Image (cartoon, grey):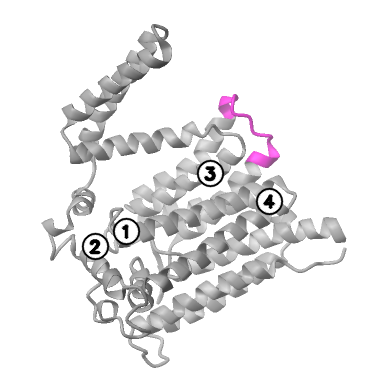
Protein backbone atom coordinates (compact mmCIF):
# COMPACT_ATOMS: atom_id res chain seq x y z
CA UNK A 1 0.00 0.00 0.00
CA UNK A 2 1.39 3.38 -0.99
CA UNK A 3 2.44 5.66 1.86
CA UNK A 4 1.25 9.26 1.57
CA UNK A 5 2.47 12.49 3.12
CA UNK A 6 1.30 13.81 6.51
CA UNK A 7 -0.15 17.28 6.96
CA UNK A 8 2.78 19.64 6.41
CA UNK A 9 0.84 22.69 7.57
CA UNK A 10 0.61 21.22 11.08
CA UNK A 11 4.32 20.44 11.02
CA UNK A 12 5.02 24.01 9.95
CA UNK A 13 2.95 25.47 12.79
CA UNK A 14 4.72 23.28 15.35
CA UNK A 15 8.13 24.27 14.01
CA UNK A 16 7.22 27.98 13.96
CA UNK A 17 6.14 27.90 17.61
CA UNK A 18 9.32 26.04 18.55
CA UNK A 19 11.46 28.67 16.84
CA UNK A 20 9.60 31.47 18.63
CA UNK A 21 10.08 29.69 21.96
CA UNK A 22 13.83 29.25 21.43
CA UNK A 23 14.32 32.82 20.19
CA UNK A 24 12.46 34.06 23.27
CA UNK A 25 14.68 32.01 25.60
CA UNK A 26 17.78 33.25 23.78
CA UNK A 27 16.73 36.85 24.32
CA UNK A 28 15.66 36.33 27.94
CA UNK A 29 19.11 34.92 28.77
CA UNK A 30 20.86 37.89 27.18
CA UNK A 31 22.19 36.27 23.98
CA UNK A 32 24.67 33.95 25.75
CA UNK A 33 27.22 31.71 23.99
CA UNK A 34 26.39 28.23 22.74
CA UNK A 35 26.97 26.37 26.02
CA UNK A 36 24.97 23.57 27.62
CA UNK A 37 24.37 25.47 30.86
CA UNK A 38 22.03 27.88 29.08
CA UNK A 39 18.36 26.99 28.73
CA UNK A 40 18.07 27.92 25.07
CA UNK A 41 20.86 25.45 24.15
CA UNK A 42 19.19 22.62 26.05
CA UNK A 43 15.91 23.53 24.42
CA UNK A 44 17.54 23.33 20.99
CA UNK A 45 18.48 19.75 21.81
CA UNK A 46 15.01 18.96 23.12
CA UNK A 47 13.57 20.49 19.99
CA UNK A 48 15.62 18.11 17.87
CA UNK A 49 14.51 15.17 20.01
CA UNK A 50 10.88 16.29 19.76
CA UNK A 51 10.99 16.54 15.97
CA UNK A 52 12.65 13.12 15.76
CA UNK A 53 10.00 11.57 18.02
CA UNK A 54 7.31 13.25 15.93
CA UNK A 55 8.72 11.76 12.73
CA UNK A 56 8.98 8.27 14.25
CA UNK A 57 5.45 8.42 15.69
CA UNK A 58 4.12 9.53 12.31
CA UNK A 59 5.83 6.63 10.55
CA UNK A 60 4.33 4.01 12.88
CA UNK A 61 1.11 2.49 11.57
CA UNK A 62 -2.04 3.75 13.27
CA UNK A 63 -3.12 0.18 13.97
CA UNK A 64 -0.16 -0.24 16.33
CA UNK A 65 -1.11 2.88 18.27
CA UNK A 66 -4.61 1.49 18.74
CA UNK A 67 -3.30 -1.92 19.73
CA UNK A 68 -0.81 -0.67 22.32
CA UNK A 69 -2.84 2.28 23.65
CA UNK A 70 -3.69 0.62 26.97
CA UNK A 71 -0.12 -0.62 27.43
CA UNK A 72 1.15 2.93 26.87
CA UNK A 73 -1.40 4.19 29.39
CA UNK A 74 -0.33 1.56 31.95
CA UNK A 75 3.35 2.48 31.54
CA UNK A 76 2.42 6.13 32.05
CA UNK A 77 0.51 5.31 35.23
CA UNK A 78 3.49 3.32 36.49
CA UNK A 79 5.77 6.28 35.83
CA UNK A 80 3.47 8.62 37.73
CA UNK A 81 3.24 6.24 40.71
CA UNK A 82 7.03 5.98 40.77
CA UNK A 83 7.30 9.76 40.62
CA UNK A 84 4.91 10.23 43.53
CA UNK A 85 6.93 7.75 45.60
CA UNK A 86 10.58 8.60 44.94
CA UNK A 87 10.83 12.02 43.28
CA UNK A 88 12.33 14.84 45.30
CA UNK A 89 10.31 17.99 45.80
CA UNK A 90 11.00 20.91 43.44
CA UNK A 91 9.03 24.17 43.81
CA UNK A 92 6.56 22.42 46.08
CA UNK A 93 5.84 19.49 43.72
CA UNK A 94 7.23 15.97 43.29
CA UNK A 95 6.71 15.78 39.53
CA UNK A 96 10.12 14.95 38.02
CA UNK A 97 12.18 11.78 37.70
CA UNK A 98 15.90 12.44 37.52
CA UNK A 99 18.32 10.47 35.34
CA UNK A 100 21.67 12.13 35.91
CA UNK A 101 21.50 15.61 34.35
CA UNK A 102 18.15 14.86 32.70
CA UNK A 103 14.80 15.43 34.40
CA UNK A 104 11.60 13.99 32.96
CA UNK A 105 8.04 14.85 33.95
CA UNK A 106 5.88 11.73 33.43
CA UNK A 107 2.64 13.70 33.72
CA UNK A 108 3.41 15.45 30.41
CA UNK A 109 3.58 12.11 28.59
CA UNK A 110 0.52 10.94 30.54
CA UNK A 111 -1.60 13.58 28.82
CA UNK A 112 -0.91 12.00 25.43
CA UNK A 113 -1.38 8.49 26.84
CA UNK A 114 -4.72 9.46 28.40
CA UNK A 115 -5.97 11.02 25.17
CA UNK A 116 -5.04 7.85 23.26
CA UNK A 117 -6.49 5.40 25.80
CA UNK A 118 -9.73 7.37 26.16
CA UNK A 119 -10.21 7.58 22.40
CA UNK A 120 -9.50 3.85 22.04
CA UNK A 121 -12.03 2.92 24.73
CA UNK A 122 -14.78 5.13 23.35
CA UNK A 123 -14.18 3.73 19.86
CA UNK A 124 -13.67 0.03 20.57
CA UNK A 125 -16.44 -0.55 23.06
CA UNK A 126 -19.16 1.63 21.52
CA UNK A 127 -19.45 3.69 24.66
CA UNK A 128 -22.98 4.31 26.02
CA UNK A 129 -23.73 6.93 28.64
CA UNK A 130 -26.62 4.98 30.13
CA UNK A 131 -24.40 2.06 31.21
CA UNK A 132 -22.67 2.52 34.55
CA UNK A 133 -19.75 0.29 33.54
CA UNK A 134 -18.85 2.68 30.73
CA UNK A 135 -19.19 5.73 32.95
CA UNK A 136 -16.99 4.09 35.57
CA UNK A 137 -14.33 3.09 33.03
CA UNK A 138 -14.15 6.56 31.49
CA UNK A 139 -14.06 8.19 34.93
CA UNK A 140 -11.17 5.90 35.83
CA UNK A 141 -9.20 6.65 32.66
CA UNK A 142 -9.43 10.38 33.39
CA UNK A 143 -9.54 10.27 37.18
CA UNK A 144 -6.51 8.09 37.98
CA UNK A 145 -3.98 10.51 36.39
CA UNK A 146 -5.68 13.41 38.18
CA UNK A 147 -5.39 11.62 41.53
CA UNK A 148 -1.74 10.71 40.96
CA UNK A 149 -0.93 14.26 39.89
CA UNK A 150 -2.54 15.62 43.04
CA UNK A 151 -0.44 13.17 45.08
CA UNK A 152 2.59 14.76 43.41
CA UNK A 153 1.31 18.14 44.72
CA UNK A 154 1.03 19.42 41.15
CA UNK A 155 -2.41 21.02 41.15
CA UNK A 156 -1.85 22.93 37.90
CA UNK A 157 -1.14 19.80 35.87
CA UNK A 158 -4.12 18.06 37.47
CA UNK A 159 -6.35 20.83 36.11
CA UNK A 160 -5.23 20.14 32.55
CA UNK A 161 -6.59 16.58 32.69
CA UNK A 162 -10.10 18.01 33.09
CA UNK A 163 -9.82 18.97 29.42
CA UNK A 164 -10.59 15.35 28.51
CA UNK A 165 -14.26 16.01 29.14
CA UNK A 166 -14.22 17.86 25.80
CA UNK A 167 -13.91 14.69 23.66
CA UNK A 168 -16.65 13.18 25.84
CA UNK A 169 -18.85 16.13 24.90
CA UNK A 170 -17.96 15.53 21.24
CA UNK A 171 -19.11 11.94 21.74
CA UNK A 172 -22.49 12.91 23.19
CA UNK A 173 -21.94 13.97 26.80
CA UNK A 174 -24.43 16.63 27.87
CA UNK A 175 -22.87 20.07 27.89
CA UNK A 176 -24.36 20.59 31.36
CA UNK A 177 -21.87 18.09 32.76
CA UNK A 178 -19.20 20.63 31.83
CA UNK A 179 -21.15 23.83 32.56
CA UNK A 180 -22.41 22.87 36.04
CA UNK A 181 -18.92 22.32 37.59
CA UNK A 182 -17.80 25.64 36.09
CA UNK A 183 -20.79 27.41 37.64
CA UNK A 184 -20.19 25.72 41.00
CA UNK A 185 -16.56 26.80 40.85
CA UNK A 186 -17.70 30.35 40.14
CA UNK A 187 -20.01 30.29 43.17
CA UNK A 188 -17.19 28.99 45.34
CA UNK A 189 -14.95 31.82 44.14
CA UNK A 190 -17.64 34.40 44.94
CA UNK A 191 -17.53 33.33 48.60
CA UNK A 192 -14.00 34.75 48.71
CA UNK A 193 -15.23 38.15 47.52
CA UNK A 194 -18.55 38.52 49.33
CA UNK A 195 -20.21 37.32 52.49
CA UNK A 196 -21.53 33.75 52.40
CA UNK A 197 -24.93 34.96 53.61
CA UNK A 198 -25.23 37.54 50.82
CA UNK A 199 -24.58 34.90 48.16
CA UNK A 200 -26.89 32.36 49.77
CA UNK A 201 -29.64 34.95 50.13
CA UNK A 202 -29.21 36.04 46.52
CA UNK A 203 -29.40 32.43 45.33
CA UNK A 204 -32.60 31.90 47.29
CA UNK A 205 -34.28 35.00 45.87
CA UNK A 206 -33.18 34.28 42.29
CA UNK A 207 -34.13 30.62 42.63
CA UNK A 208 -37.64 31.28 43.95
CA UNK A 209 -38.36 34.05 41.44
CA UNK A 210 -37.20 31.90 38.53
CA UNK A 211 -39.24 29.00 39.88
CA UNK A 212 -42.53 30.92 39.92
CA UNK A 213 -41.82 32.54 36.53
CA UNK A 214 -40.87 29.32 34.76
CA UNK A 215 -42.78 26.54 36.50
CA UNK A 216 -45.69 28.10 38.36
CA UNK A 217 -46.34 25.67 41.21
CA UNK A 218 -44.84 22.58 39.60
CA UNK A 219 -41.66 20.90 40.85
CA UNK A 220 -41.64 23.04 43.99
CA UNK A 221 -39.82 20.52 46.19
CA UNK A 222 -37.31 19.74 43.45
CA UNK A 223 -36.54 23.42 43.07
CA UNK A 224 -36.27 23.85 46.82
CA UNK A 225 -33.91 20.87 46.96
CA UNK A 226 -31.65 22.44 44.34
CA UNK A 227 -31.50 25.68 46.35
CA UNK A 228 -30.67 23.69 49.49
CA UNK A 229 -27.94 21.81 47.62
CA UNK A 230 -26.41 25.11 46.50
CA UNK A 231 -26.47 26.35 50.10
CA UNK A 232 -24.66 23.17 51.14
CA UNK A 233 -22.11 23.65 48.35
CA UNK A 234 -21.36 27.19 49.52
CA UNK A 235 -20.72 25.91 53.02
CA UNK A 236 -18.60 23.03 51.74
CA UNK A 237 -16.52 25.29 49.50
CA UNK A 238 -15.71 27.50 52.47
CA UNK A 239 -14.65 24.46 54.48
CA UNK A 240 -12.49 23.17 51.62
CA UNK A 241 -10.79 26.53 51.24
CA UNK A 242 -9.94 27.00 54.91
CA UNK A 243 -9.38 23.39 56.03
CA UNK A 244 -8.35 21.31 52.98
CA UNK A 245 -6.29 23.58 50.71
CA UNK A 246 -2.61 23.85 51.62
CA UNK A 247 -1.42 27.24 52.90
CA UNK A 248 0.48 28.00 49.68
CA UNK A 249 -2.65 27.20 47.64
CA UNK A 250 -4.77 29.57 49.72
CA UNK A 251 -2.03 32.15 49.36
CA UNK A 252 -2.13 31.88 45.55
CA UNK A 253 -5.87 32.50 45.53
CA UNK A 254 -5.51 35.42 47.95
CA UNK A 255 -2.80 36.93 45.75
CA UNK A 256 -5.08 36.63 42.72
CA UNK A 257 -7.61 38.84 44.50
CA UNK A 258 -4.97 41.36 45.63
CA UNK A 259 -1.30 40.72 44.74
CA UNK A 260 -0.26 43.81 46.73
CA UNK A 261 -1.12 42.04 49.98
CA UNK A 262 2.30 40.41 49.68
CA UNK A 263 4.14 42.37 46.95
CA UNK A 264 7.60 41.01 47.82
CA UNK A 265 6.47 37.43 48.37
CA UNK A 266 3.59 35.50 46.85
CA UNK A 267 2.41 38.49 44.82
CA UNK A 268 5.81 39.18 43.25
CA UNK A 269 5.37 37.04 40.12
CA UNK A 270 1.94 38.44 39.34
CA UNK A 271 2.98 42.06 39.85
CA UNK A 272 6.17 41.77 37.81
CA UNK A 273 4.37 39.91 35.02
CA UNK A 274 1.85 42.74 34.77
CA UNK A 275 4.67 45.30 34.72
CA UNK A 276 6.34 43.41 31.86
CA UNK A 277 3.12 43.26 29.84
CA UNK A 278 2.38 46.95 30.39
CA UNK A 279 5.98 47.94 29.62
CA UNK A 280 5.72 46.25 26.24
CA UNK A 281 2.98 48.59 25.12
CA UNK A 282 1.67 48.21 21.60
CA UNK A 283 4.85 47.36 19.70
CA UNK A 284 7.24 46.27 22.46
CA UNK A 285 10.62 47.32 23.83
CA UNK A 286 12.45 45.55 21.01
CA UNK A 287 14.03 42.12 20.71
CA UNK A 288 16.57 41.62 23.48
CA UNK A 289 15.60 44.83 25.29
CA UNK A 290 13.07 43.53 27.81
CA UNK A 291 14.46 44.49 31.21
CA UNK A 292 11.79 42.81 33.35
CA UNK A 293 12.50 39.38 31.87
CA UNK A 294 16.24 39.77 31.34
CA UNK A 295 17.11 41.18 34.79
CA UNK A 296 15.48 38.36 36.79
CA UNK A 297 12.54 40.41 38.05
CA UNK A 298 10.38 37.44 37.00
CA UNK A 299 11.63 34.25 38.75
CA UNK A 300 9.98 31.73 36.38
CA UNK A 301 10.90 33.67 33.25
CA UNK A 302 11.97 30.54 31.32
CA UNK A 303 8.96 28.37 32.13
CA UNK A 304 5.56 29.49 33.41
CA UNK A 305 6.16 33.19 32.65
CA UNK A 306 8.06 32.86 29.37
CA UNK A 307 5.22 34.59 27.55
CA UNK A 308 6.04 37.75 29.54
CA UNK A 309 9.22 38.08 27.48
CA UNK A 310 7.21 38.04 24.27
CA UNK A 311 4.70 40.59 25.57
CA UNK A 312 7.44 42.91 26.85
CA UNK A 313 9.76 42.77 23.83
CA UNK A 314 7.21 42.33 21.03
CA UNK A 315 4.33 44.27 22.59
CA UNK A 316 0.63 43.60 22.30
CA UNK A 317 0.94 43.16 18.55
CA UNK A 318 3.62 40.50 18.91
CA UNK A 319 1.77 38.77 21.74
CA UNK A 320 -1.45 38.67 19.73
CA UNK A 321 0.47 37.31 16.73
CA UNK A 322 1.88 34.45 18.82
CA UNK A 323 -1.53 33.73 20.36
CA UNK A 324 -3.09 33.79 16.88
CA UNK A 325 -0.45 31.37 15.60
CA UNK A 326 -1.13 29.12 18.58
CA UNK A 327 -4.87 29.19 17.92
CA UNK A 328 -4.26 28.25 14.27
CA UNK A 329 -2.15 25.34 15.51
CA UNK A 330 -4.95 24.11 17.80
CA UNK A 331 -7.63 24.55 15.14
CA UNK A 332 -5.47 22.63 12.67
CA UNK A 333 -5.33 19.71 15.10
CA UNK A 334 -9.13 19.64 15.23
CA UNK A 335 -9.39 20.01 11.46
CA UNK A 336 -7.10 17.03 10.89
CA UNK A 337 -9.00 15.00 13.48
CA UNK A 338 -12.29 15.74 11.74
CA UNK A 339 -10.80 14.89 8.32
CA UNK A 340 -9.32 11.56 9.39
CA UNK A 341 -12.57 9.59 8.87
CA UNK A 342 -11.82 7.68 12.06
CA UNK A 343 -13.64 7.84 15.39
CA UNK A 344 -10.48 7.20 17.38
CA UNK A 345 -8.58 9.91 15.49
CA UNK A 346 -11.48 12.32 16.00
CA UNK A 347 -11.65 11.78 19.76
CA UNK A 348 -7.88 11.69 20.17
CA UNK A 349 -7.46 14.96 18.27
CA UNK A 350 -10.14 16.68 20.34
CA UNK A 351 -8.50 15.47 23.55
CA UNK A 352 -5.04 16.63 22.52
CA UNK A 353 -6.33 20.01 21.37
CA UNK A 354 -8.39 20.51 24.53
CA UNK A 355 -5.36 19.95 26.78
CA UNK A 356 -3.34 22.50 24.80
CA UNK A 357 -6.25 24.96 24.93
CA UNK A 358 -6.18 24.68 28.74
CA UNK A 359 -2.45 25.41 28.73
CA UNK A 360 -2.92 28.47 26.53
CA UNK A 361 -5.88 29.95 28.40
CA UNK A 362 -4.58 29.38 31.93
CA UNK A 363 -1.00 30.46 31.16
CA UNK A 364 -2.06 33.75 29.57
CA UNK A 365 -4.65 34.30 32.33
CA UNK A 366 -1.93 33.76 34.96
CA UNK A 367 0.31 36.34 33.35
CA UNK A 368 -2.35 39.06 33.24
CA UNK A 369 -3.56 38.24 36.76
CA UNK A 370 -6.88 36.59 35.95
CA UNK A 371 -5.96 33.15 37.31
CA UNK A 372 -3.88 31.95 40.28
CA UNK A 373 -0.26 31.00 39.62
CA UNK A 374 -0.54 27.21 39.36
CA UNK A 375 2.53 26.23 37.37
CA UNK A 376 1.13 25.65 33.88
CA UNK A 377 3.61 26.47 31.08
CA UNK A 378 2.74 27.50 27.54
CA UNK A 379 3.60 24.40 25.53
CA UNK A 380 6.18 24.94 22.74
CA UNK A 381 6.93 28.44 24.04
CA UNK A 382 8.04 27.75 27.63
CA UNK A 383 11.22 25.89 28.48
CA UNK A 384 10.69 22.20 29.18
CA UNK A 385 12.06 19.08 27.54
CA UNK A 386 9.31 16.73 28.69
CA UNK A 387 6.51 18.90 27.33
CA UNK A 388 8.27 19.33 23.97
CA UNK A 389 8.97 15.62 23.52
CA UNK A 390 5.44 14.72 24.67
CA UNK A 391 3.80 17.12 22.22
CA UNK A 392 6.09 15.76 19.50
CA UNK A 393 4.79 12.27 20.22
CA UNK A 394 1.22 13.54 20.43
CA UNK A 395 1.33 15.31 17.07
CA UNK A 396 3.09 12.32 15.50
CA UNK A 397 0.33 9.96 16.63
CA UNK A 398 -2.30 12.27 15.16
CA UNK A 399 -0.38 12.40 11.88
CA UNK A 400 -0.24 8.60 11.88
CA UNK A 401 -4.03 8.45 12.07
CA UNK A 402 -4.27 11.09 9.35
CA UNK A 403 -1.95 9.13 7.06
CA UNK A 404 -4.13 6.05 7.52
CA UNK A 405 -7.09 8.05 6.26
CA UNK A 406 -5.07 9.28 3.29
CA UNK A 407 -4.06 5.71 2.47
CA UNK A 408 -7.68 4.55 2.53
CA UNK A 409 -8.57 7.27 0.06
CA UNK A 410 -5.61 7.02 -2.29
CA UNK A 411 -3.82 3.76 -1.56
Reading the image, the residue beneath label 4 is 338
Residue drawn at x 62%, y 38% is 171
| CB under 8 Å between discs 3 and 2 | no
Q: In this rendering, is residue 282 above or below 224?
A: below
Q: Earlier in the sequence, mark 3 or mark 2?
A: 3
Label 2: which secondary element: helix
Label 4: which secondary element: helix
Q: Residues within 10 Å of mark 4 (few under 14, many from 20)?
A: some
Reading the image, the residue beneath label 3 is 166
Extreme residue toward the bottom, this view: 33
Reading the image, the residue beneath label 1 is 366
Reading the image, the residue beneath label 2 is 270
Q: Quadrant of the N terminus?
A: bottom right
Q: CA distance from mark 4 to mark 1?
A: 31 Å
Q: Earlier in the sequence, mark 2 or mark 1?
A: 2
Residue drawn at x 40%, y 57% is 83
| CB under 8 Å between discs 2 and 1 | yes
Answer whether residue 288 is visible to the viewer in this image. yes
In front here: 344 or 114?
344
Amino acid sequence: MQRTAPDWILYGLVFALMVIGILNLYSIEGFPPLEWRYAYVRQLVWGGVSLSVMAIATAIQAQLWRYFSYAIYAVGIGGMILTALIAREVNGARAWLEFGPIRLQPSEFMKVATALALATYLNRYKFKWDEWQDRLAVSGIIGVPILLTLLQKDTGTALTFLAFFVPLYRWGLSVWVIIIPVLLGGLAFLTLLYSWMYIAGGLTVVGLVSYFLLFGRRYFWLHLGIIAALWAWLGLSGYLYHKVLAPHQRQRISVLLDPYKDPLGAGWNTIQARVAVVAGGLSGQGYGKGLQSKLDFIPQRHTDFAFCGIAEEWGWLGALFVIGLYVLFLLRIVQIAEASNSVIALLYGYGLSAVLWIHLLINVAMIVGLFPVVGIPLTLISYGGSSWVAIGAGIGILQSFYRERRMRLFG
